[in-house]
């Protein structure tokens, strides 16, 4: 039945999977080495572990389409926090040649908001 789904459902699946993979890739190290990452961020290791947990759970929700809207909401909140830290705490510009600016965070926020508003699509578990 997958062939009978329209391009909108396939597009949402692609957005969900790509966003989910990005956050799975960034969340797992926070679970494994939260103490080491906490030093670089200026956070407690428990906070970094919690952030990693939210990223991993949300990424799995997005990839599987299982409560994807909740996963997208949580990812959106994470990205709002990331943008806040980059702009106001770490004074990182929108884009820079020597470091990642917050333009990447902004596009990830946009994808998360899109999935939140449009839903998971027809190719999902729920």
Image (tube, rainbow, N blue to C red):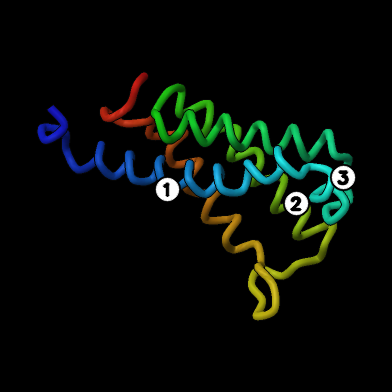
How packed mark 3 is, by other alpha carbons closer than 10 Å (few <14, some 14-19, many 20 or more), is few
Q: Residues within 10 Å of mark 2 (few under 14, many from 20)?
A: some
| Residue at 38%, 34% in the rendered image | 118
Image quarter of residue 49: top right
Residue at (45%, 28%) from the top-left corner? 68
User: Alpha-carbon distance for marks 2 and 1?
Assistant: 23 Å
On residue 123, the disc is none
Q: Is the residue under label 1 in contact with that under label 2 (CB below 8 Å)?
A: no
The residue pinned by badge 3 equals 43
Please identify, in this view, whether the residue under mark 2 or under mark 1 is nearer the observer. Answer: 1
Residue 84: numbered disc: 2
Q: Name the residue under label 1.
A: 18
| Towards the viewer: 11 or 60 | 60
Quarter of the rendering occupied by the N terminus: top left
Q: Are marks 3 and 2 in contact (CB under 8 Å)?
A: no
Q: Which residue is drawn at 33% across and 45% down?
A: 14
Q: Which of marks 3 and 2 is in front?
A: 3
> Badge 1: few (under 14), some or many (20 or more) residues near its Cα, within 10 Å?
some
Cα gap from disc 3 to disc 2, whole angstroms? 15 Å
| Percent of width and height locating residue 120 | 37, 31
Q: Marks 1 and 3, how far apart in space? A: 28 Å
Whichever of labels 1 and 3 marks the residue nearer the N terminus, that label is 1
Q: In this view, does 126 lie to the left or right of 68?
A: left
């Amino acid at each position: 039945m997958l062939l009978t789904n329209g391009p909108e459902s396939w597009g949402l699946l692609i957005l969900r999977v790509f966003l989910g993979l990005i956050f799975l890739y960034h969340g797992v190290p926070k679970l494994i080495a939260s103490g080491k990452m906490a030093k670089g961020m200026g956070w407690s290791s428990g906070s970094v572990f919690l952030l990693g947990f939210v990223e991993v759970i949300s990424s799995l929700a997005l990839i599987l389409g299982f409560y994807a809207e909740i996963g997208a909401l949580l990812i959106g909140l994470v990205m709002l926090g990331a943008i806040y830290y980059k702009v106001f705490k770490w004074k990182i510009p929108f884009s820079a040649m020597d470091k990642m600016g917050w333009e990447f965070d902004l596009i990830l926020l946009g994808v998360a908001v899109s999935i939140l508003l449009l839903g998971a699509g027809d190719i999902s578990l729920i």
